[in-house]
Structure formats: C-alpha cells, structure tokens
Amino acid sequence: MRRKSVPLAVGLSVAITILAPAYQGPAIASEPPPGSQVVHEIPDADAISAEIDRVVAEVQDLRKLKSQPAAGVPGVDQQVENVFRCAEFMETARYCLGYGWTTSTEDAVQAELQAVAVTESTRRSAAEETGDLSLQEMIDRSSAMSVDERALADRRELEDAATGIEKFIQLEELRLGPDPVSIDAPAGSVGARAVIGGYTYPESGGILQGRVSEQETTYWCGPTTLQMMAWNYGSHAKVAQSTWATRLNTTSAGTAISDMIRVINNNGQLSKWVTQQGAKYLALDISGHTYAQWYQLNVNHYSTWSTPVVLHPILLKKYYPYLDDNGSGHFQLGRGWDFESHKADSWQLKYYEPWNQQRFNPSEPFIPRKQKRWAKNSYLANKEHFQHNIGV
C-alpha cells in the first residue's frame, strides 16, 4: 500500500491524503479528489504510551462488581463506565475499550451504552442467540477478571489499537470526502464505473475463493467468520471452528468484536490479510457514517485492498428476509459489491453468512452461505446494533 509517511509530533497538525494502493488487479480505486483533507493532531510515541498507562491505571481504582441484571438495578451506569473506558489518542478521536475507534466523546459513548443496558434484557429475550456478546455479557466477562488479568487485557487491546492511528485518519479522510455519487457509463455496460466520495470504482466486483462454512453452534458466528476468512487466503487449510473459538475466547455467550480484531491482527493465517492491505484491522464506530459513506468504506476494502470486512449487524427479519426469527448481534464476512444502478437503494453487498437456522431447527428454511443482498439493509442492521461498529 502506498501511504504518505506521518511524522508523530506532539501538537503537530497533520493533513493526511489517502493514496490508493499499487495496482492489485482490475478492481482499483482512483486517486482521491483534490481538496479532500482533514487535519488531525497526532501525539508522539511517548504521549501514546503515557495515555495507555493512564487508562490501564484506572483498573486499579475499579471496584469489583458482582454481575447482576441491568434493568432497574443501581450500579449499571458505573458498570458501563468501568468497562468502556477511552484512550484520548487525539483531540478529535479516541479508542474506547470493547467498542473501537470513534469521534464520539467518552461521555457520549458511555451514556449511549448506559441507555442500552436498561432495556437490553427485555429486547434480547425475544431474539434467537446467534453468536455475538450482548452488552451485559461484555460487562460480566470483564467483571469476572482479576485486576491483573483485566489490566493486561486492556493494555494489549490499547497497544494494538494505537497502531491503527494512521489508518483511522485515512478512513476518516475517506468518510469526509465529497459525497455525490454518479455512474460514468450506463449501469450494466462493459467498463461501467461508479464514482462515490470522489473516488472511482468498478461497477461491481468481489473477492475470496468461495470456500464457505455454516456455524456449528448457535454461538460460533465469530469463529466461523474467521474460519472462512483464513480458509479463503491462498491455499490455507480449513481449521476447525473449535480451534478458532479457543483463539477468540468464545463462550456459549458468544464472541466480542475486540477479540475478532485481536485474532485477525495476530494470527499467522489471518495476518496475511493485514500484510496485503498494509495496516492492521481495527474496530470502527460507523454511527456517524451516512449510507453512501458506509458503502464506500466496504467497497474501498474490496476494490482497493482486496481484503474482506468483518460485518457486525443485528440479525432482524426486517433487514434479512431469509430469517424465520429475529436474532441477536452477529458476524458476517463482507466480500464484494455491485452498484447495480444509479439508485443507491439498489446497491448490493456480497457476503458470507455463517448462520443457517435450519441446522438448529429443521422446520425452518435453509439459508445459503453466499449472499448478495441490498446493502442498505446491511447498513441499517449495522447501525441498529448497540455497538454500531465494523471490522476493517
């Protein structure tokens, strides 16, 4: 990947311009439009280290909270504040533990999650568990750790996140570029290309080799997503879902997106995708993305870097018509796009779906692994998830 070097100096205002990678096949984005720059102040390595130390030191001040139902029980606000703490790596952005990179303030992130905690137990009781950790399950898991275990886990997560500062800025530059969308040739014609956010992409395309699996338990959508992600790189052998579940610390409650990112960035098979895009994966808050910006985020990964995306929706029938019942949070493997026509509501997203309801209830319809669906529904399902983040 061709990137502009960014000197890390305290208080230095740095304008980052995204540069497209060197040619990697027919799916290649154009250079960015002129004048599309965002100014960020980036701390130096010592400041980053000091900020990580500050956030980790807060663990020593946290009282051990006994797990308890969230609704109506005093202390839920404090539980959220104890778990979802943020490192202020930049004045304009931060990384929040268990949540990801965001431009929202720590107070705003915590207030939103506190509101979710009050109603979550009622909402999830009506849904089928499909493999993602709920907010209360994330709190319970963190509370069950010793102080030393928690401090170590927090430090590792923050150090990994800090390596993504430059990539986060690049993605913000992508998001804040010009928004108009056009097709410079009739949709469906040979050589048709779409312009979105000032960047030019082929009208359609996709990656991965078609090697797919369905999750073997109701709570293994995370392990199955990474199983397919690794299996679809080169000639990699298929590794058992149980092995991925162990690597991800998956329990019967499900998998956390922070563990998905951790394993992608540090596992030998999956890290080849990291090498291909020239930067580590990160969890990104998409609450501020318009539909066009979210779609471009996906298309840029598939077209420019030829790397998959960890989709993180809530499985609801209103967004996924193949469902017989509403599900909980979920992971899918994004792999391609199709602008389809001039109309944004017709844009398509290609992905691998781990969930097959028929495996667990033979009376329910079969769900194919390979999906090509309206992207707008996937965007709305991602936004409605309580974390509204994505693995990119």
Image (cartoon, rainbow, N blue to C red):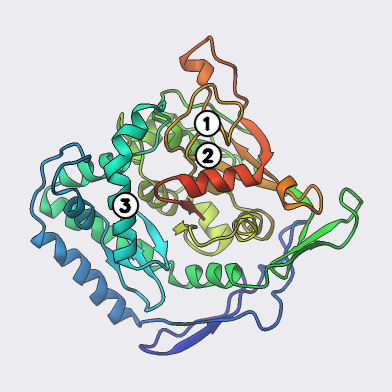
Residue at x 65% of width, y 32% of height? 370
Q: In which quarter of the view is residue 290 placed?
A: bottom right
Mark 1, residue position: 354
- Based on the displayed image, in which of its 4 quarters is residue 352 positioned? top right
Q: Secondary structure at mark 1?
A: loop
**Residue 113: numbered disc:** 3
Q: Count the labels in the image.
A: 3
Q: Nearer the viewer, residue 182 or 309?
A: 182
The answer to whether any part of residue 269 appears in the image is no
**Identity of the residue drawn at 14% across and 49% down:** 75
Name the residue type under label 2. Gln
- Say what amino acid the circle numbered 3 marks: Leu
Query: Is residue 73 left or right of 380 when viewed as pictured?
Result: left
User: Callout 2 environment at 10 Å: few (<14), some (14 to 19), or many (20+)?
Assistant: many
Per the image, label 3 sits on a secondary structure element best described as helix
Which quadrant would the N terminus be assigned to in this image?
bottom right
Q: CA distance from mark 3 to mark 2?
A: 23 Å
Q: Which residue is mark 2?
A: 332
Q: Residue 42 in the image: x percent, y percent?
A: 41, 81
- x then y, percent, for residue 175: 58, 67
What label sits on residue 128 in the rendered view? none
- State yes or no: discs 1 and 2 in contact (Cβ < 8 Å): yes
